[in-house]
């Protein structure tokens, strides 16, 4: 079975994808700097997995490593070769992801996202590992003006975060052009992943104040924060709040597995793929659905729009559906139920973990 390197595998999407790949029998190495996740948390999650199946431990390694550290990353690849299990492919999640933070601290974003990626690609090239699934983002597009965004829609990121994703896509494209027979590259442009693993064992656990809507909602629901800030009530949408395409994080994880299988079946390829549901939901609709399915109240207040935000961002997902043999099938209600189940479990889980 192939060995896969997952950068940023302790984070929200990375941990869900890792759990799915483990279930499917893959051998994984996770590298993460833990800048936006917790080592302890990750180790304890997989202690739970280990209790379910002892063999999980044999197929997963965690290495604390910033992807900008060339020598350490190079050693990860070299040690894998020495073990007789070379890394065949990479899923590259590691990076900083807040739009508003990227406007405030652009250098941090260029450095972590672009320099980190260049370093990773250098090490991959040295070790002739040329298959990569990259976490790109819908923020590479401009506004959609009510149209579903296809992969060839206008590319016009509105903030340093989106620009950094676009630059990485371009770097990957130039690598592909340099060796079309061997590089196999899928840029997955995610829309808005929310929800959590159905088990309630893993979910989104941001350090500090969440910059995304959904973890903010769950933290208000549990009482960690007193009210939700809704950024803007004058967007050109049916209720004045911004529209996004929310996708269940496990549907997204399944998209990665399909993308890996697809790349494996190709001789050399570069492709951009939207991972979304093609359904738009306003902020208020998401809040109301969350309240309804979970029988709770989410107090909120309107505040000014955030710089760098757009009104509407919804995927046309036909290309991914056709090419990947993949389809998102969990609805917005499921996302709200699973996300809330996770948030409620977080405190209990920490108590349980203390026993290990
Ligand atoms: N969550 C979203 O809404 C969303 C949408 C589109 C794209 N993405 C992209 O998907 C990827 C994963 O997102 P997520 O929501 O899981 O974010 P996350 O912050 O939960 O996970 C990212 C992980 O990468 C790690 N990391 C960051 N910089 C690193 C570095 N230099 N070296 C090593 N590790 C580093 C963090 O500690 C974290 O564990 C990111 O690249 C993000 O830009 C996310």
Image: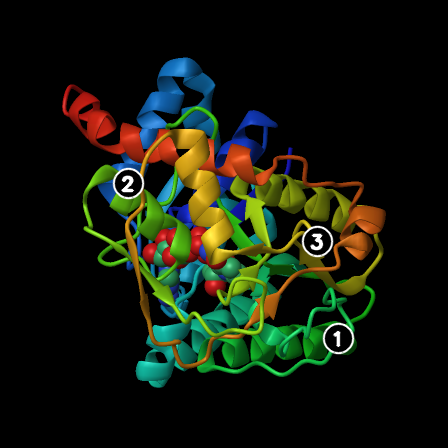
Give percent across and percent down for residue 38. Answer: 26, 47
Question: Does residue 50 lie above or below 191 as drawn?
Answer: above
Discs 1/2, front:
2
Q: Give the mark, 3 or 2, whose residue is nearer the N terminus.
A: 2
Kindly identify the residue that appears in the image at 65 percent across and 59 percent down.
188
Q: CA distance from mark 3 to mark 2?
A: 27 Å
Q: Where residue 278 is drawn, which disc sits there?
A: 3
Query: What is the residue that sits farthest to the front in this orientation?
Result: 239
Q: Where residue 153 is drawn, which disc sits there?
A: 1
For mark 3, does the 10 Å Cα neighbourhood hold few (<14), some (14 to 19), or many (20 or more) residues? many
Give percent across and percent down for residue 47. Answer: 32, 25
Look at the image and name its color scheme.
Answer: rainbow
Q: Can residue 11 be seen in the rendering of this structure?
A: yes
Discs 1/3, front:
3
Q: Give the mark, 1 or 3, whose residue is nearer the N terminus.
A: 1
For mark 1, does the 10 Å Cα neighbourhood hold few (<14), some (14 to 19), or many (20 or more) residues? some
Q: Quadrant of the C terminus?
A: top left
For mark 2, does the 10 Å Cα neighbourhood hold few (<14), some (14 to 19), or many (20 or more) residues? many
Say whether mark 3 is within 8 Å of ligand 1: no
Q: Can residue 7 be seen in the rendering of this structure?
A: no
Kindly identify the residue that appears in the image at 56 percent across and 59 percent down.
244
Q: Quadrant of the N terminus?
A: top right
Q: CA distance from mark 1 to mark 2?
A: 37 Å
Question: Does residue 73 lie above or below 221 as drawn?
Answer: below
> Which of 110 and 155 lies nearest the eye of the viewer?
155
Which quadrant of the render holds ligand 1?
bottom left
Q: Where residue 221 is drawn, which disc sits there?
A: 2
Q: For mark 2, give the secondary structure.
A: helix
Q: Give the mark, 1 or 2, whose residue is nearer the N terminus.
A: 1
């Amino acid at each position: 079975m192939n060995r896969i390197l997952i950068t940023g595998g302790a984070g929200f999407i990375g941990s869900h994808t890792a759990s799915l790949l483990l279930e499917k029998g893959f051998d994984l190495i996770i590298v993460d700097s833990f800048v936006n996740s917790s080592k302890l948390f990750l180790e304890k999650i997989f202690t739970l997995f280990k209790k379910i199946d002892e063999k999980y431990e044999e197929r997963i390694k965690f290495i604390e490593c910033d992807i900008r550290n060339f020598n350490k990353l190079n050693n990860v690849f070299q040690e894998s070769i020495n073990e007789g299990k070379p890394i065949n492919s990479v899923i590259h999640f590691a990076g900083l992801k807040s739009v508003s933070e990227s406007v405030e601290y652009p250098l941090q974003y260029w450095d972590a996202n672009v320099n980190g990626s260049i370093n990773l690609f250098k090490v991959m090239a040295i070790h002739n590992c040329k298959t990569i699934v990259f976490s790109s983002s819908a923020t590479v597009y401009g506004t959609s003006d009510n149209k579903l965004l296809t992969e060839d829609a206008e590319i016009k990121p509105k903030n340093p975060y989106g620009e950094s994703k676009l630059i990485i896509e371009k770097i990957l494209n130039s690598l592909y052009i340099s060796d079309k027979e061997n590089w196999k590259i899928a840029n997955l442009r995610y829309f808005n992943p929310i929800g959590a693993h159905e088990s309630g064992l893993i979910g989104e656990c941001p350090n500090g104040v969440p910059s995304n809507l959904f973890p903010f909602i769950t933290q208000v629901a549990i009482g960690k924060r007193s009210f939700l800030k809704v950024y803007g009530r004058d967007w050109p949408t049916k209720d004045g709040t911004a529209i996004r395409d929310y996708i269940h994080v496990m549907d997204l994880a399944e998209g990665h597995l399909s993308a890996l299988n697809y790349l494996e079946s190709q001789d050399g390829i570069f492709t951009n793929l939207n991972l979304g549901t093609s359904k738009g939901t306003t902020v208020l609709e998401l809040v109301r659905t969350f309240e309804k399915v979970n029988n709770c109240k989410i107090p909120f207040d309107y505040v000014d729009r955030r710089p760098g935000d757009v009104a509407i961002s919804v995927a046309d997902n036909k290309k991914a559906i056709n090419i990947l043999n993949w389809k998102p099938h969990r609805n917005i209600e499921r996302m709200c139920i699973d996300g809330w189940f996770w948030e409620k479990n977080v405190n209990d889980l920490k108590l349980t973990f203390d026993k290990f």
